[in-house]
Amino acid sequence: MILYDVKTAPSPRRVRIFLAEKKINVEVIQVNTAEGEQLKEEFLKLNPWATVPVLELDDGTCISEAIACCRYLEEVYPNPPLMGVDPSEKAIISMWEHRMEWDGFLPVAELLRNTAERLKNRGLTGTLNFSQIPALAERGRKRIAHFHDFLDKRLAESKFVATDKYSIADITAQVSIDFAQRAGAPVQEDKKNILRWHSNVNSRESAKA
Amino acid sequence: MILYDVKTAPSPRRVRIFLAEKKINVEVIQVNTAEGEQLKEEFLKLNPWATVPVLELDDGTCISEAIACCRYLEEVYPNPPLMGVDPSEKAIISMWEHRMEWDGFLPVAELLRNTAERLKNRGLTGTLNFSQIPALAERGRKRIAHFHDFLDKRLAESKFVATDKYSIADITAQVSIDFAQRAGAPVQEDKKNILRWHSNVNSRESAKA
């Protein structure tokens, strides 16, 4: 297996953490997105959506989308389970993971991509160029604050995001929180439950991935 | 099981089609979102994100997020499989499903919620009110056109969206296409492959769901 990665990007980090938790070693190839390598024909053959991560399987099948890469890995390497073990738990984890993506990850992407100077006409990932929308960045910032409020309440009543065990929902939340910090929207000091949980997940070896 | 539904809304339709494909009967309760029932305390106890669908299991566990509802149903009622049967197929279907949601479903939601008069301060689902962002509606419209271009090419080479079999990726694409039509962004007549595929999926009994 080969992971096409961008070391500084949040989406592939979800897969890198997932791999680290399962102690799976794969070949890693860095894609130079700063120079637009993801938009070149060679890369588009691997992933027509021009995004990382891409997991290339040994038979040449290419899986893009972080959640799909994790699905493959979970099926082939079920231990430790990160996506649940029975139908109800699988669904609960999927629900939380999806919400962490929509309420946590997406608003940060909206904030960053609609403000960063270097992303001026790159309001979205992919093959199309879109101008930045300042109002969307502003909305993103409000949503992040609301997300932190919500997550803090959740983590007051639950050790981890989805259940009492670490799961892919924690990974997406963790990556979203760290991504928000880099985008200038860090967790505020009064969010004691997020900070306790973050210190916990951050102490795992996988957090370095 | 109880499905909390809004008959005219696209997200719960993904689950209704999924249920119909598997021939599962559940109790269905309509939520009156036009009157804000999803924002009332009683509903927020079922789903703090104030969205439909919600699938209430017999033990009282509530699953929101369409993909998570489908995950539960797939695990408990594996036949016919709609999310793949081996690791590689599961990942390929997850990849396509996720892309149909981000590139197909999300832009239509952005177009509709940022233009419809009745949704004036409801730019997003959920408990917060957001003003409409006209530039986001405009971007949504461009993205839908691009999505239709992309999907048409895909369906020139593949009978169904993800593989040669009908899957949840088709359901998300089908709902997104129908949703776009209602939002004033129908598939253009030159998109012969989408039209052929749509006529095929639309002829299934589940399309009425």
Image (spheres, coloured by chain):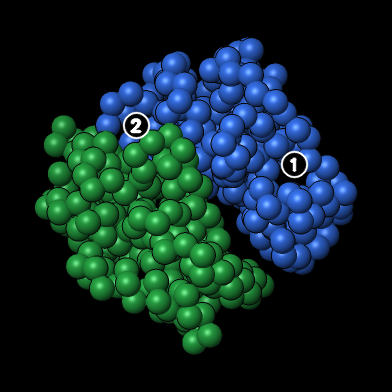
Chain colours: A green, B blue
Position of residue A151 in the picture relative to residue A46 (left or right): right
Q: Which mark is residue B183?
A: 1
Judge whether residue A178 can be spotted in this image. no
The residue positioned farthest toward the bottom in the image shown: A189
Q: Using the rendered view, name the quadrant where residue A56 is placed.
A: top left
Q: Which mark is residue B90?
A: 2
- Camera-nearest residue between B59 and A118: B59
- Camera-nearest residue between A157 and B183: A157
Judge whether residue B123 can be spotted in this image. yes
The amino acid type found where label 1 is placed reads Ala
Location of the N terminus of chain B by quadrant is top right
Q: Position of residue A96 (x, y in %)?
A: 49, 52
User: In the image, which is nearer the foreground, mark 2 or mark 1?
Assistant: 2
Position of residue A138 in the picture relative to residue A57 (left or right): right
Position of residue B136 in the picture relative to residue A152 (left or right): right
Q: How many marks?
A: 2
Which chain does tag 2 point to? B
Q: Image point 38% across, 67% down: which residue?
A: A174
The residue positioned farthest toward the front in the image shown: B59
Label 2 vs label 1: CA separation? 31 Å
Circle 1 residues within 10 Å: few <14, some 14–19, many ≥20:
some
